[in-house]
Amino acid sequence: MKNFIIFFLRITTLYQILHDSIHAKSGQEAGLKLQYIRTDTESVLGWVCRFLLFCLLFVIRRHFR
């Protein structure tokens, strides 16, 4: 249960980062339509479709078997 809560909080944080960067208005003429974020442990792709923001999360495994 503890791992699920940590994972849920991480997904929520990544979604908020995507949302803020896509819908930010400072210094941009138009909002972004696509945003890609990569960290050491995950890759996140977010895009806008009409009025919705979709988020796709890839968890990167460091050790391959």
Image (cartoon, grey):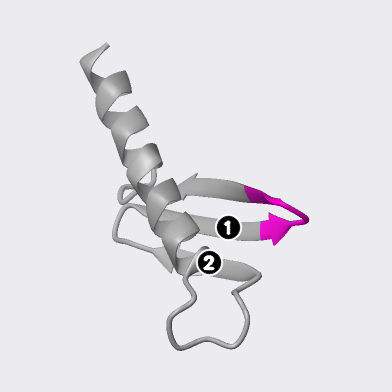
Residue 1 at x, y percent in the picture: 27, 11
Residue at horizontal 40 percent and vertical 50 percent from the top = 16
Up-down relation of residue 12 to residue 30 (above or below): above
Q: Which residue is mark 2?
A: 22
Number of callouts: 2
Residue 7 at x, y percent in the picture: 32, 31
Up-down relation of residue 38 to residue 12 (above or below): below
In this view of the protein, which residue sits in the foreground, 22 or 38?
Answer: 22
In this view of the protein, which residue sits in the foreground, 1 or 65?
Answer: 1
Say what amino acid the circle numbered 2 marks: Ile
The label nearer to you, 2 versus 1, is 2
In this rendering, position of residue 10 left or right of residue 47: left
Up-down relation of residue 44 to residue 23 (above or below): above
In this rendering, position of residue 44 left or right of residue 13: right
Looking at the image, can residue 60 be seen? no
Pointer 2 with pointer 1, Cβ within 8 A: yes
Up-down relation of residue 11 to residue 58 (above or below): above
Q: Residue furthest top?
A: 1
In this rendering, position of residue 7 left or right of residue 52: left
Secondary structure category for the residue under label 1: strand
